[in-house]
Image (cartoon, rainbow, N blue to C red):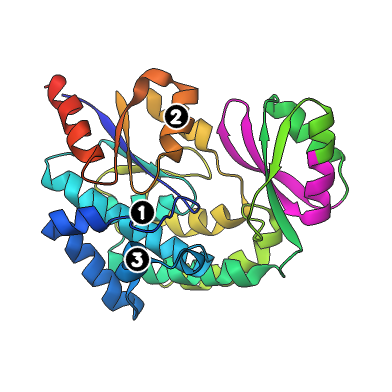
Amino acid sequence: MLRMAFVFPGQGSQYIGMGKEMADSYEEAARVFDLADQICGYKLSTLCFEGPQAQLDQTIYSQPAIMVTSLACLAAARKNGLSAQLMAGLSLGEYTALTAAGAMTLEQSLPLVMTRARLMQEAVPIGKGAMAAVIGLETDLVERICDQVEGTVMVANYNCPGQLVISGERGSVEEASSLLKNAGARTMMLPISVPSHSPLLEECARKFAVEVARVQFSEPIVDVISNVNARENRAGDFPELLVKQLHSPVLWEQSVRYMLNKVDYFIEIGPGSSLSGLIKKIDRSRILGRIEDNKTLPKLMEKVKEYE
């Protein structure tokens, strides 16, 4: 029997039309969108299926949209008999994983994600924060260069070997990017104004803690690997971990390496293929496929049958 991990994408994977084929083809997926529309108080499904892109790209809309689309894709996957031994998600995707694992219901997680998105969007004035991708340097060198820069800048995402994201105050991020480029890296400022996973979100995290404290978490039926400590945790740990996640680095590469010892393959569930790309750079042989539409799901099921 294949041991599989389901992984769920974070913000930035959104696109117009995401989830529509799943909702049209699977009643179970359509029900996820219907329930989300009721919880949100607006037609999240229409935003996912028809846009407009400018609205879908706003943090307050993109985060709930990505989570709900991923859960709709998961419903289709489960209808086809797929199950996982481990789950994880990148940043926002961790909320999807916790919902998928039964630690929260959608009625609990969707309002929490909506609040998270709003607080993040309000956390730092436009133009003050920034994030940048850094490609081609050893991790310890990137960390040392960030430490040399005045102001706030740090590694926010450990994505895969040679690919990191830095985050913090715009001026500090720009200075660090320049120094990193001089050291041989390729750098790219990201179209993101919220300096996620940096100390600039500590005040945001304190506000969010009040909301998280209201959620009664259940023990997950499948272990979920946390972005903060790259390990599975119990229900009592989730509130602290989700609050820390806002201002702590995402240990994605570390999480994947930990899961490599426990599963045979990874399946990316939700819009886009960003996580598949990252995992291939960690271990090319461990991605079985992904699920986001009526093309990728049958293709994946064919691969699964090869191992039965």
Figure quadrant of the N terminus? top left
| Horizontal side, residue 227 vs residue 140: left or right | left
Viewer-closest of 235 and 78 = 78
Stretch of the chain drawn in magenta: 151-177
Indicate whether 261 appears above or below 244. Answer: above
How far apart marks 2 and 3 lie (CA) works out to 30 Å
Task: Pinpoint residue 253: horizontal percent, then vertical percent.
Answer: 52, 32
Amino acid under disc 3: Glu
How far apart marks 2 and 1 lie (CA) works out to 18 Å
> Which label's residue is closer to the chain start, 2 or 3?
3
Query: Answer yes or no: do the residues labelled 2 and 3 have beta carbons within 8 Å?
Result: no
Question: SS at mark 2?
Answer: helix
Question: SS at mark 1?
Answer: helix
Q: Name the residue at 12% across, 42% down.
A: 80
> Which label's residue is closer to the chain start, 3 or 1?
3
Task: Pinpoint residue 278: horizontal percent, then vertical percent.
Answer: 48, 32
Amino acid under disc 2: Ile
Q: Which residue is mark 2?
A: 279
Q: Which residue is mark 3?
A: 50
Residue 215 visible at all: no
